[in-house]
Image (tube, grey):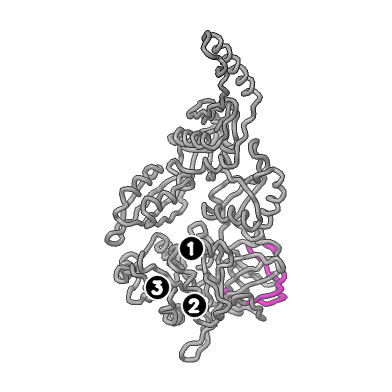
Amino acid sequence: MKHLRNFSIVAHIDHGKSTLADRLIQQVGLVDERQFQDQILDSLDLERERGITIKSSAVTLPYKNSAGESFLLNLIDTPGHVDFSYEVSRALASCEGVLLLIDAAQGVEAQTLANLYAAMEHDLVVIPVINKIDLLAADIPMCLEQIDRDLGLDSSQALLASAKQGQGIEEIIEAVISFIPAPKGDEQAPLRALIFDAFYDPFRGTVVAVRIFDGKLGAGDQILLMASQAAHRVEEVGLFRLGREAVGALSAGMVGYIIAGIKTVSDVAIGDTVTLAGAPATAALAGFKTVKPVVFSSIYPVTSDDYLSLSEALEKYKLNDAALVYQKDSSAALGLGFRCGFLGLLHLEIVQERLEREFDQSIIMTSPSVRYKFVLKNGQELEIDNPQDYPDPSYIEESLEPYIKASILCPERYIGAVMKLGLDRRGVNSTLNYPSPGRTEITFELPLAEIVYDFYDKLKSITQGYGSFDYELIDYRANKLVKVDILLNGEKVDALSIIVHKDRARQRALNMCDRLKEELPRQQFKIAIQGAIGGEIIARSTISAYRKDVTAKCYGGDISRKRKLLEKQKKGKKRMKMVGQIEVPQSAFIAVLKTDDD
């Protein structure tokens, strides 16, 4: 066990985590030049295109030091985005230490701090690494100062590296061996293994990634998942090289995989404890919780004939992504579809893009919403994530919405713009912190619904890309919430309904009406687009009708002749309006999601 090291690389988005993992893999000779590709641990095209890690992955690196000792270094690569913070916490629980990456040009960012606190919660050894030292804009003294003051770490132990150029990689590996302790565990104790990831193999079923804390596990053993109490027989255990490499057994301290005929990823809970069915452990490993979706949206096929293929695509997608929650839904405007729950906005975008690319689906997504709570006058409490389920307003005693604590790091010159954005989004209890000269940390408590709409894009715009953002859910708070319906010629379009704060209702309704006016095609009759709260109209736009010039044939003559023709035309248009149907194109549903300033 003393020749094992389990570690992770954590960093803010775009600080070079995947590039450093590539260099470590090349340094130990796990892959030759011919097989190598950038972001080698990122298996999805989407991850490579966006330069982000979506799925956690692990790799075992064999390394021989200058003294001739052989080590096995288990690198557990984690997603960098706030949406996947639970997966990151389980991956960190599987390690003894982390490499904390800091961009030499940008310094400490919001998620650098968040990741440091997460590592400290698990009592991990933190090795600071200043990456991208080859950049012209690199400011190493600033980074060392921030490591000392902001992070409270010893800057004299910070390593300098350029993952892109391959500088400092040997020193990083030596530091991992020297500073990160070997794992502890008892091979003779009952088996306890932590599940930190799971993915689907179409030929073998679910492959479960585990860190063994106590005991020993081999092929043929009968295992028990402690949270679900499901029992399975192990077919194969092994280590993660760049592929899967089967071994006879996994023992305490090791990181590897289990294949046990588990049919879907949903049957495995991340953070669950694996033990032997015959000699179970007395207590599960701490920290397990069920991940709940935060953002909700409905997905509909563009044509109703594609409903079955969308259903199949979601079933297949769910095999790989247990975090996606969905159920059947229907809309008078869009037909049959599915109501889906996501971990956050990035997760929503990833699901949408993967359905379109990998499963060739053309889909319409409704406006994202969050889960609200309503306390009725009879004392009943409802949790609602779909505007169509909004209760009768006369029965509502109190309405509550989820709040988050948002932490924004930006250069000092953008304080005014960021404060204005936070206050415009109903932010309260704002605090200012100056972690280092020229940099500001601003924290707000604000409703989750306000960041779901377009907050991140606005923040990037007003800070010219220098603002970084991190958040955590805190609680539910009472607010005046209303349901805004969109009416087309007096008919409600249910798929366009939203739940919004009462003070924001008119502005959002006006914005939606104006967007629809641009998108809906003109007809032979006038179309009234209205925003309404219950029976009260709060916003309106009108699309004027196509109009034939019926008076063109009247050259001069009496005015009453023209008036008679216009009256006749007016009656015809009125009759047409009674029977005329308004088709809402797909682009209209996308347009109402855009912001006022797009």
At mark 1, the secondary structure is loop
At mark 2, the secondary structure is helix
At mark 3, the secondary structure is strand
Amino acid on which the number 3 mark rests in the picture: Val
Reply above or below: 36 against 520.
below
Residue pictured at 54% horizontal, 8% vertical:
560
Which of disc 3 and disc 2 is earlier in sequence? 2
Which of these two is toward me, 185 or 325?
A: 325
Cα–Cα span, label 1 and label 2: 18 Å
Q: Is residue 337 left or right of residue 87?
A: right
Find the magenta span and give its range: 212-238
Residue pictured at 56% horizontal, 47% vertical:
296
Which of disc 1 and disc 3 is earlier in sequence? 1
Which of these two is toward me, 112 or 543?
A: 543
Question: What x and y, as percent, mark residue 173?
Answer: 46, 80
Amino acid on which the number 2 mark rests in the picture: Leu
Question: What x and y, as percent, mark residue 103?
Answer: 39, 67
Which of these two is toward me, 176 or 367?
A: 367
Instruction: Name the quadrant containing residue 321.
Output: bottom right
Which of disc 2 and disc 1 is earlier in sequence? 2
Specify the label residue 80 is tagged with: 1
The kind of secondary structure the magenta stretch mainly shows is strand
Mark 2 lies on residue: 24
- Mark 2 burial class by Cα count in 10 Å: few <14, some 14-19, many 20+: many
